[in-house]
Image: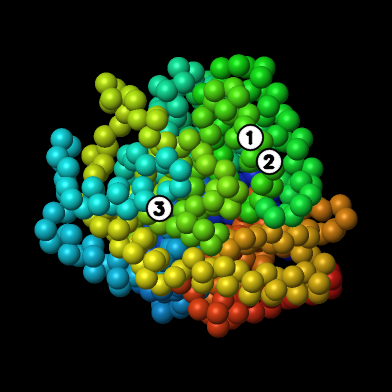
Amino acid sequence: MIDAKISTNSLIELSKTEGDLNSTPYRNEWLTNNVGAESREWLEEDANYFIHQSLSTPCLDVLESCEGIYLTNIEGKKYIDFHGNNLHQLGYRNPYIIDKIIQQLQVLPFSPRRYTNISAIKAAEKLASACPGNLNKILFTPGGASSVGLALKIARTVTGNYKTISMWDSFHGASLETISLGGESIFRKGIGPLNSGNEHVPYPDSYRGIFWSDTYGDEKYAEYIEFILEREGDVAAIIAEPIRNTSVHIPSASFWKRIRKACDKHGALLIFDEIPTFMGRTGKMFVFENYEVIPDIVVVGKALGGGIIPFSAVIVNDELDIPADKSLGHYTFEKNPLGAAALIASLEFIENENLLEKVSLLSGVVKTRLWEMYSIYPIIGDIRGIGLLWGIELVTDRELKTPAIKEAEKIMYHCLEHGLSFKVSQGNVLTLCPPLIIEKAELLLALTILENAIRYISEEQNSI
Ligand SMILES: Cc1ncc(COP(=O)(O)O)c(C=O)c1O
């Protein structure tokens, strides 16, 4: 019954968004069967006061607390969180980070413009020392979209050009300038004129892993970018995620090396958006370190504030530190001492716990389990991943790669029911982003919940 009710519009939108929608029949079914009376009342209250929007209000559940890899709702149900808005790299309520934030909170919680503070200076120094190459000049902002906006302003100022090349179906934030760069119709449609000069290209999606010797067809994507650079002649920057965090598409090393060269040839800057992946998601501090390609500008956020303080940064090659007579953007919370304390504590925590090594070890565990599942369940059309970022692409036909959109949503809700939370990207990709502090046994437990859901939905589909 429910299948028949999924609207064509919902399906089209599902296949183009970074996450699952909150308006499908399966969401309603979830609410009816899984949410208790008290939670339902709060959800209604929430929907009464907050502006309704896709991907947010009306919401999924009401939370009471979080710790480590877990979210707990007001009825005491726990979810292992493999989504966490990509901010929970170091786990929820990380005690080491909380302690440092509290120490800062008691001394200097805010620093007005024109003043600096030692917490911010030390954070900038520590962040710069974590960056390869000459990436060592920094501006902090309160959020990712603001940092992307600053990166664009710097690129315009330095090159004297304003055009950009970015990727269809990408997300760089929800502000007007960032949806102009982004490629998701759910953000762009019906909103009026966007920034001009934003050329879009497809994200290279045919390659399966950085270290495979073959380029698997992503040369054609590079050629198209080179063509635009040549043809336009005045592009300020290319901006992209070096690995797409939502659908987990992983371009080849030769792709990014070729784009780096093309940028240098045509005087365009290469900007990497590492807002969701910075702080070790792939087993390296930055994703681009896997490629041995250094961008001119990198934008980071989310985990930067320790999963607690809204904090983001734009980091540039020090040769680009030239717009001193311009006011680029000193946000009210620019040199936020609390965000800075969280950042220092987070980087210390990663070092103290050898977290990057741990990610590489656990990566093998996920890989083995997911490929076992691939060999059993034909609904799994592809598996892509690196470090602790994995995407499972679901299909109704492996040969034709027909997206299994309804099935992906059903699997997600089945997992939620059994205590595992993740999001569905671009309609049919299950995106798995566990906190990096997860233990092997917890990881295996979560993957068993996932496998049970895949088996259940596969059997259900076969019996129809
Ligand atoms: C790749 C990417 N860029 C930019 C942003 C925007 O960050 P914020 O929500 O902090 O503005 C996000 C957020 O999801 C993101 O995933």
The residue beneath circle 3 is 130
Q: Is residue 436 left or right of residue 219?
A: left
Residue 307's image quarter?
A: bottom left
Query: Crowding at label 3, few (<14), some or many (≥20) Cα neighbours within 10 Å?
Result: some
Q: Which class describes the residues within 10 Å of circle 1: few (<14), some (14-19), or many (20+)?
A: some
Mark 3 or mark 2: name the one nearer the start of the chain: 3
Q: Tell me residue 163's x, y (percent).
A: 53, 22
Q: Earlier in the sequence, mark 1 or mark 3?
A: 3
Please tell me the numbered disc located at residue 149.
Answer: none
From the viewer's side, name the closer residue of 345 and 164.
Answer: 345
Q: Which mark is residue 255?
A: 2
Any part of residue 71 in sight: no
Check disc 3 and give the amino acid type. Ala
Q: Which residue, given by chain and number where applicable, does mark 1 sit on?
A: 259
Residue found 40% across the figure and 30% down from its top: 319
| Residue beneath the point at 26% across and 34% down | 330
Q: Looking at the picture, which amino acid does disc 2 mark?
A: Phe
Q: Marks 1 and 3, how far apart in space? A: 24 Å
SS category of the residue bearing label 3: loop
Amino acid on which the number 1 mark rests in the picture? Ile
Q: Position of residue 268 (x, y in %)?
A: 54, 26
